[in-house]
Amino acid sequence: MEGWQRAFVLHGRPYSETSLMLDLFTEGQGRVRILAKGARGRRSNLKGCLQPFTPLLVRWSGRGEVKTLRNAEPVSLALPLSGLMLYSGLYVNELVSRVLEQEANYSALFFDYLNCLQNLAGATGSPEYALRLFELSLLSHLGYGVDFLHCAGSGEEVSDTMTYRYREEKGFIASLVIDNSSFTGRDLKALASREFDVVTLRAAKRFTRMALKPYLGGKPLKSRELFRQFQVKKPASSSDNSAG
C-alpha cells in the first residue's frame, strides 16, 4: 500500500521496548492493524500524533495481517474530547474495533465516524443524539436491514399509538405485550427519520443495544465499564447520558 490514506487510531498498545501496535480506522481499507516501529522511542516524531481522535494521513506496507507503518502525519490537532464526550468517543472506537472486519472498505462509514467525533467535540449537553446516529449508520453499513415503517407480520404501515415488539432478524410485529423489546409506532418513525425527542431518543438507545448485541457476542464493552466508573465519581450526572 503505497498511497496515503486518511485515518484515526482506534486503539494502541506498547509493543516491544519502543514500538506501538495500532488498530486504525482508515478511509479506504477500514480497520487495519499496523506496527509502528520505534514510535515510542525518545527521538520519534510520532509520539504525540498516534493517539485516538487525531486526524491522520498514513501509509504502510506489508501483505500480512499486521502491516508496517511507513509514515504518519497529523492533519490537525486532536479533536477536543473530555469528560462525558471522551468516554463516548472511547465507546465509539471500541464499537468500531469490535464489529468491523479487518481490511474491508467502509469509506462512507469513515465519514460518519468523523462526523460523530466532530459532533461530540462540539456538543455542550448530552452525547446521546450523536451516538444514536452513528450506531444506526454502523448497523446500516454492516448490512443490517430492518423496516421501521411497516409491521413485519401484516405489512401494514405502523401506527403512532400501536405497540410493536422487535424480533431479531424479522423486524417489528404488532403486539399487546409491553416490555423492553416493545416500541410504539411513533418510536419507529423517529428511528426511520433519525429525528428524535427525549422519549424517542431513549427508545433508539434500547433498539441499537438490541440490534448491536449479536455483533458484539457475549463479551462486554470495556468502555461501558469505564463510563460507569466515571459516573460514580460524578453522581449528579443523569443515568440517561451513559455511553453506548
Image (cartoon, rainbow, N blue to C red):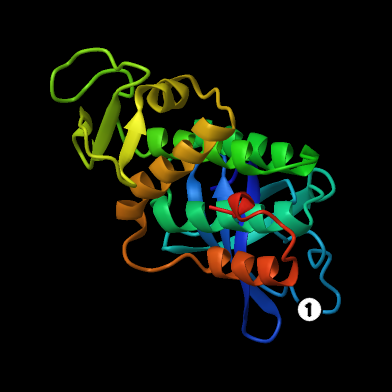
* Visible residue check, residue 35: no
According to the image, label 1 marks what residue?
A: 41
Q: Residue furthest top?
A: 157
Left or right relative to 116: residue 144: left
What is the total number of numbered labels drawn onto the structure image? 1
Q: Residue furthest bottom?
A: 17
Q: Residue at x 67, y 50 (%)?
A: 58
> Residue 21 at what x, y percent from top left?
59, 71
> Residue 167 at what x, y percent from top left?
21, 40
Q: Residue at x 77, y 52 (%)?
A: 81
Measured along the vertical axis of the image, is residue 27 above or below residue 148? below
Q: Which residue lies furthest to the left in this view?
A: 154
Q: What element carries label 1?
A: loop
* Visible residue check, residue 216: yes
Left or right relative to 136: residue 164: left
How many C-alpha atoms fall within 10 Å of the one at disc 1: few (<14), some, or many (≥20)?
some
Measured along the vertical axis of the image, is residue 122 above or below residue 53? above
Residue 152's image quarter?
top left
Q: Which residue is drawn at 42% across and 63% down?
A: 65
> Residue 157 at what x, y percent from top left?
26, 13
> Residue 149 at what x, y percent from top left?
32, 18
Left or right relative to 23: residue 20: right
Measured along the vertical axis of the image, is residue 130 above or below residue 95? above
Q: Residue at x 30, y 45 (%)?
A: 179
Residue 72's image quarter?
bottom right
